[in-house]
Amino acid sequence: MTFLRAVLWDMDGTLIDSEEYHWLSWRDTLLAWGITITHAQFLSTFGMRNDEIVAQWLGTPSPDVLERIATSKEERYRKLVCEQGIKPLPGVVQWVSQLHEQGWLQAIATAAPRKNVDVILEALSATHCFQAIVSAEDVQQGKPDPEVYFKAAGRLGVPPAHCIVIEDAAAGIEGAKEAGMRSIGISRNGQQLPADIVVRSLDLLGTDALEALGSGSLGTGNGPAAARITSGLALAKEELSGPINGLR
């Protein structure tokens, strides 16, 4: 019997290096609201959800203010991508294409807004390689909560134990472990990541690395991941009861 298998991709810092565009967008947006942040302060929130980031600088803003700030920031970001372009990180194009050709299902699992995901995949000419997207609008909890991974696995119809997460942040790797999934960590700056495999760049990843991880079986054990795998499978069934939210 052939089992479905999937790769769940983080986006920012994994598929692309978008740090500079996000920094410029947040800096200029917050400045318009009379708030000045340093680059170091920006980095301390990079990868978090917009509502969590805004709360760092404004405490508990009204929903209207939060929406206006987040919308302005993301519009600035997408404008930079469209006007200046963005390149995939080394090895990304080769791996995404190879996995697609080999029959792996692929999904984006990110804290970014859906419009950002669409813009990035179009810029990379990679939309056709992904069967599902789970973005900020689809989840209540950000990483390291595994909700985004369970949602992505559910939309693909693949059990969590047959999914591999590719991430650049410790929170994302922890979420993958909590979901009972294997993981590959991208550590461009040498950061320690608790992943099954850690490389500085995807072009340094062994050609059989995903096959090796995919052929291994995760023991459920008695840890937190074991308790959540059942929930993940239930969520997968729930997602499959309706239309799969694939790419347009």
Image (cartoon, grey):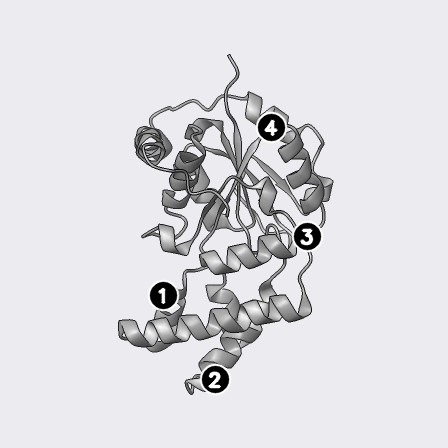
Instruction: From the top left corner, tell me how far across and down residue 76 is, in percent.
Output: 53, 73
Residue holding disc 4: 103
Comparing marks 4 and 3, which lies closer to the viewer?
Answer: 4
Residue holding disc 2: 31
| Numbered label tally | 4
Q: As rendered, which of 55 and 76 lies closer to the eye?
A: 76
Q: As rendered, which of 196 and 119 lies closer to the eye?
A: 119
Circle nearer the N terminus (4, 2): 2
Residue holding disc 1: 51
- The answer to whether residue 13 shows anywhere in this view is no
Q: Residues within 10 Å of mark 3 (few under 14, many from 20)?
A: some
Alpha carbon separation for disc pair 4 and 1: 36 Å
Instruction: From the top left corner, tell me how far across and down residue 146 is, in percent.
Output: 38, 43
Q: In this image, 110 relative to 56: left or right?
A: right
Three-letter amino acid code at the position of disc 2: Leu
Q: In this image, 171 relative to 185: left or right?
A: left
